[in-house]
Image (cartoon, grey):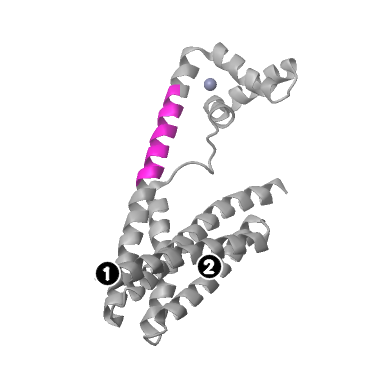
Amino acid sequence: MAHRESHRVDRVGWLRAAVLGANDGLVSTASLVVGVAAAAASHGGILVAGIAGLAAGAMSMAAGEYVSVSSQSDTEKADLAREATELAGDHDAELRELAGIYVGRGVAPELAAEVAQQMMTHDALGAHARDELGISEITTARPIQAALTSAVTFSAGAALPLIVAAVAPMPDLSLWVAGSALIGLAVLGALGARVGGAPVGRSVVRVVFWGALAMAITAGVGRMFGVAA
Ligand SMILES: [Zn+2]
């Protein structure tokens, strides 16, 4: 049972990131296409803007994710190195510290001391990493993997409005793109809720609402500048 649950946590983290990336790609590209279309651009101009938006978005997601996860990874490594130094320097103080953490979580002092003793005999750094620093195997940061995942999932989400924009008839292009984007967002919202075990209805309403708002605002901006130009 514990084994199955740990796999669920692992899978949820992964799939959640993928769903969020696709969500971002869908909303930003659909909004871009709708905004440019509202400025009365040509079909070719709309497609070029959409493709540029996909490329720029995927790169910026990858770079942002790489920087953020790398700095998290650096922080974790520095924390672990300092913890290792402390363990080598004053083992008894570290033993008391770990026992104190268990007491703080409700374990009786004598038992906490015994648990801390046994855990530190087994794997001192591992015990301090988990229970003091909160670093587990699941949270161990992987920057390249995170960057690639973001870029790929963003592009997958962005592909839907781009394909629709390429094949939709010109005067009603915005309606086709916005409609298909909202359906895509509803599907992603439901998928994200399902894998996370969250209520599906609420999640769908939330992503559809924010997606619709994003497209409405960019369409308004596009119209304003399109008329001004
Ligand atoms: Zn410690």
The residue labelled by disc 2 is 185
x, y percentage for residue 31? Answer: 41, 67
Please tell me in which quadrant of the rendered image residue 37 appears.
Answer: bottom left
Image check: 79 left or right of 96? left
Q: CA distance from mark 1 to mark 2?
A: 32 Å
Front position in the image: 97 or 105? 105
68 is within the stretch colored magenta: yes
Q: Which residues are magenta?
A: 67-82
Residue shown at 55% from the left, 33% from the top: 134
- The local crowd at label 1, few if under 14, some if 14 to 19, many if 20 or more residues have their Cα within 10 Å, is few
Q: Is residue 99 above or below residue 173?
A: above
The residue labelled by disc 1 is 228
Q: Residue furthest left?
A: 229
Give the dominant element type of the magenta stretch: helix, strand or loop: helix
Q: Is residue 102 above or below residue 28?
A: above
Quadrant occupied by the C terminus: bottom left
